[in-house]
Amino acid sequence: MKKAFNLSIAAILVSSAMAAHAGISIVDSEEGNFSIGGNVELNFNYQDRDSNDSGNSEFNQDGRVLIEFAGQKYSENGHFVGVVAQPLFESTGAVEMDDAYFEFGKVDGWAVKAGRFEAYDMFPVGLDVFLEYSGDTANDLYSDGSAYTYQSKEGRGRGSDGQIMYNQTFGNLYVEVGAMLGDRSGLFGEDQKYHGEKITSTKDAFLVRPVVAYQMGDFSVAASVETNLVSDAVVTESGVDISDRTGYGLTGNWTSGDWSVNANFAYMDAVDENNMSAGLNALYKNFGVGYIHATNEYENKKFSNWAEGDVDVQTWYASYAFNDVLQVEDFSVLLGTYYTTVDNKLKASHSNASFNEEDDFGARIRLFYEF
């Protein structure tokens, strides 16, 4: 009864504080902290896509509200325990979870994190208010019959049954080793196909993703590898193990004054195909611009007569942010646009895949408020 009463009083205090302030810290002391925050994002979208079956321009609205509950407890010897939960309420009415993890370690030293989260970003795209790729091309899910813009994210997180990561800082050097556990057949989209064959057998995978990053004044550089250590984790009807995938990533950043520039490179060595992506983007004050080029090389070795040759994807995008709109702190209106194309260079006599050449364009107005 006493516990329930205390929880009720806490709920009343939290509600009152949220009504009076945009973002609150319930507890903030040398022993620990607990806070409630989040953000609201609402998008108004226009798209002109060749892949649209109706051939019409598309207008729609989407968005979500994210609430973050975060707390940490500190010990006298400099160690800590923390937890973060981020329920996500989508404008469609669906309720999802963004991050939900537990962590412990030493302040400004090592840490272990487990749950649902994203690890180090090896392909940062800057201010990407609206960024998509032609047709069904994705940066995190493989879609059979479409080019793949690989961005060193297959082992980054939020894509399996479980996840754990160790990270540590040594001065200017940062090191992390992450692992994703469980079923990874979801990587191959809803069709569950690879090079024209159905996936017929799966078992739990074990993906590892070590990252090393170094800061040198205004410059930083990071390198990574991600690979699956369990054989036959995803197998097609002809018995081919398509979970045999190894990706490499390299990214660099230069930040000085109002400027921030990212240069990215990613390469995936997969069964009967190699995927290479390179990107460059820059942010000056509130304006961002970027370019991404992806090349997919296909061959017929384990899957006969499916695809042979190259498919390229080129994508340009730009964004601008109006901050503190109406003189309201943390309220922003963002504008974003992208244009993307596919260049099909497959040998017609050696391909049963479509890879339609498509030119897609999109524009977005985003309302964003952080509390």
Image (tube, rainbow, N blue to C red):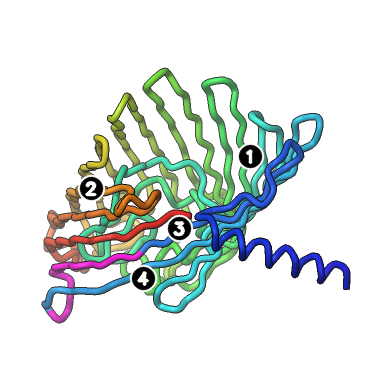
Q: Earlier in the sequence, mark 1 or mark 3?
A: 3
Whether residue 194 is in magenta: the answer is no
Q: Main secondary structure of the magenta part?
A: strand
Left or right side of 29 for 178: left
Taking the view exactly as shown, the residue that stands out farthest to the bottom is 54
Disc 2: which residue: 320
Measure how far apart labels 1 and 3 are at the Cα level. 28 Å
Query: Which residue is pictured at 57% across the width and 20% down the height?
Result: 171
Name above or below for residue 52 compared with residue 303: below
Which residues make up the magenta segment?
42-54
Circle 4 sits on which residue?
197
Q: Nearer the viewer, mark 4 or mark 1?
A: 1
Query: Which of the 4 image quarters holds residue 116?
Result: bottom right
What is the distance, in whole Å, between disc 4 and disc 3 at their CAs? 42 Å
Q: Secondary structure at mark 1?
A: strand
At which x and y percent is residue 101? 63, 54
Task: Find numbered disc 4 in the image and state the secondary structure of the residue it sits on.
Answer: strand
Q: CA distance from mark 3 to mark 2?
A: 19 Å
> How many residues crowd around disc 2 within 10 Å: few (fewer than 14), some, or many (20 or more)?
many
| Residue at image mark 1 | 166
Q: Which residue is mark 3?
A: 39
Marks 4 and 3: which is nearer the front?
A: 3
Q: In this orientation, which residue lies closer to the viewer: 268 or 266?
A: 266
